[in-house]
Amino acid sequence: MRIEGRSFAGSCHERVVVPYFRVLAVTSPTSACPPLGELHRRRLRAIWRSAGWPSQDLVEVELLAAGWVERLRDGHGRETLRVTDAGIAVLAATLARNRAARDAHEALIGRVAVAMQRAGRIAWRGLSLRVRIGDDAAGTGRWAIARPDLFSVRNTSVEDYLEPVVHEIKVRRADLLGDLRRPAKGAAYRQMARECWYVLAEGIGDAADVPEDYGVMVERAGVLDVLRPAPRRPLRLPFATWMALARATPEPGEESGQRTLGSPDEDGPDPLSIEG
């Protein structure tokens, strides 16, 4: 890389020439970099995945000022954006943070599922259920897709005793607050469960942060503490939910330490084995 021309007093513009591209680099050592947040990281990911066509908005200006992206021009004067090495480091750090949060999220879902199984329930994670929300006397509702973190029913053969329950798991406060800003999501959950719960990792919130429509639990030292019980509402599972449950695989049960009838004895041969 070489620099063409010369710098003038009081100017922060220098012309920089790179192979096949010509850019106008703006340097301003006296200006502080603005604080960048999740919006900027999402835009940075979008630029990384795209051809780099500029949006020419203020978010882009802040990315350029922070040095996370740079402008490039081809021989026809068309300008594109490229993620810099500093921007790639930001993407890598964001990826590592999201993976850690996702691992913690999945681990807490698993612990809640075990608690439900110990309470005599069958639990599913990763369900995608189509429910109708917002219905009124004029029938002006709409369909929505609900994806609860954990859905469970009692292990019973009597439909009236199923008591379907949704548990929404949160390990980061930002995710909790973002969830609460989406009322349609909660409305969809209430159409598929008698009780809806938020299960929070310790330190990210309490019952005062969650609307009264939900019960609230907090995990402390591996124990689920109930801060507020969930209100119950009458509900019968619709046929579409039954079909979704029939196609899905529930969470596997805990491994039991008790040997089953006919299992091999540690001190002797298997009585049901056939030798020779």
Image: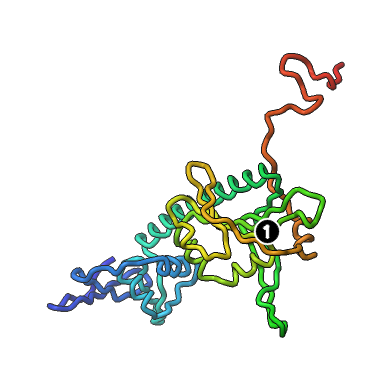
Tag 1, which secondary structure?
loop
Camera-nearest residue between 81 and 208: 208
Q: Residue at x 68, y 29 (%)?
A: 257
- Residue at position x 45%, y 59% in the image: 173
Location of residue 125 in the rendering, given as x and y in whole percent from the top left corner: 65, 53
Characterize the local packing of mark 1: few (<14), some (14-19) or many (20 or more) Cα atoms within 10 angstroms.
many
Q: In this view, does 221 lie to the left or right of 29?
A: right
Q: Quadrant of residue 69?
A: bottom left
Number of marks in the rendered image: 1
Q: Which coloring applies here?
A: rainbow
Question: Can you name the residue that lies furthest to the top here?
Answer: 267
* Placement of 276 over or under 132, stated as above or below: above
Q: Where is residue 168 in the image (x, y as percent from the top left)?
A: 58, 58
| Camera-side residue of 54 and 76 | 54
Q: Which amino acid does label 1 sit on?
A: Leu
Q: Which of 42 and 127 is in front in this view?
A: 127
Residue 119: x and y, percent?
67, 44
**Side (left or right) of 183 relative to 251:** left
Q: Which residue is farthest bottom?
A: 138
Residue that appears at 87% across and 16% down = 276
Depicted 154 relative to depicted 259: above or below: below
For label 1, the residue is 127
Is 46 situated above or below 114?
below
Q: In which quarter of the image is the N terminus?
A: bottom left
Q: In which quarter of the image is residue 52?
A: bottom left
Estimate the x, y position of residue 142 in percent, counting from the top left. 68, 77
| Left or right: 103 as drawn, with respect to 77 | right
Residue at x 62% of width, y 44% of height: 115
Hey, which residue is sitting farthest left in the picture? Answer: 9
